Image (cartoon, rainbow, N blue to C red):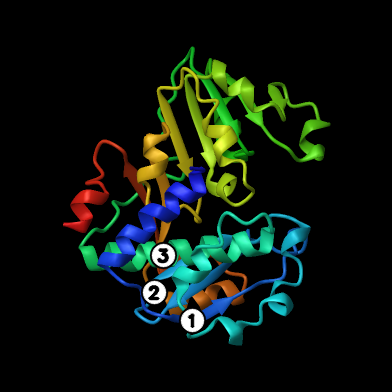
Amino acid sequence: MTIEEELLSDLGRLSRRFPPPPIRSVYLPEPQPHALRHTEFGMITLEDGSAGLYYAWLGEGQQGMDERYPVETLVGTDPLALAGRLPERDEAVRSLAMAAVNAVTASAFGRAGYRPPDAPDSFGALQLRPGDHLGMVGFFPPLIGRLAGSGVRLTVIEKKPRFLEQEHGFEVTSDPTRLRDCNKVLTTATILLNGTAGEILAQLGRAEVVVMVGPTAGFVPDSLFARGVTAIGGTWIEDAPLAMERLRSDEPLGEAARKTLIHRDEYPGLGALLA
């Protein structure tokens, strides 16, 4: 099975034990990455207040989502049906499905009594030492600035041409096989949205630490842990109405959400949650 199929299989098991309520509200922003002050996210909220995000700057495939998928046709429907479309190739569909996956996961986690721990930082508590070779899937500018003079070798995997064409002082490539030389990897959860997760995780090679982070990393983590990921940092929506208000106003989520970090060795596992 693909990573998306494995994730949905786990979500299906969890949902049979904790059936999710219908969709209450949907926010589908029109991507304008060059006009906004904050990275934009779409959101799906369920009737029990659980919510899930999707990254809204993925590409042209997300343009006009509110016209292609009118909110009124989604409200009141089963979020599992929408989540099940995650393996599709269409970026807009995958975006909606990712938000639904995250919302259903949050609902089930809450009813199972599991509350993901708080994160100490935005980089999954990644510890770097001189001599480490860090593979970074996607640009993390704040972390890159901290690596100067640290003795850490850096390889960035990036598909956007504008990054590949610039001089950076470290390796930037579109070739994911370069991750095989890295002993630590930091990846954005967007790889689940753009369909490259399976390809990226297959190249972990000698990596002893693999951290996946991002507000859209709110899914059942078992399948990712089984493929070598050691920690997942995401965002847990504490107050869905406030979060919706903040997103619509182009403001940070602030107290409407909190950053979480699930370590593979500390996570109870799907079996324990089902019990």
Residue lying at 46% horizontally and 72% vertically, measured from the top left: 79
Q: Tell me: residue 195, above or below residue 49.
A: above
Q: Which mark is residue 207?
A: none
Residue lying at 41% horizontally and 31% vertically, measured from the top left: 228
Residue type, numbered disc 1 = Thr
Q: Are marks 2 and 3 in contact (CB under 8 Å)?
A: yes
* Location of residue 160 in the rendering, given as x and y in whole percent from the top left corner: 76, 41
* Location of residue 46 in the rendering, given as x and y in whole percent from the top left corner: 42, 77
Label located before the other in sequence (2 or 1)? 1
Query: Where, by quadrant of the figure, is residue 19 drawn?
Result: bottom left
Per the image, label 1 sits on a secondary structure element best described as loop
Which residue is disc 3 drawn over? Answer: 257
Q: Nearer the viewer, residue 150 or 205?
A: 205
Residue 90 shown left or right of residue 80 in the figure: right
Q: Are marks 1 and 3 in contact (CB under 8 Å)?
A: no
Taking the view exactly as shown, the residue that stands out farthest to the front is: 1
Q: Which mark is residue 239?
A: 2
Residue 89 shown left or right of residue 121 in the figure: right
Which residue is disc 1 drawn over? Answer: 77
Give the alpha-carbon distance from disc 1 to disc 3, as whole Å. 25 Å
* Location of residue 222 in the rendering, given as x and y in whole percent from the top left corner: 35, 45
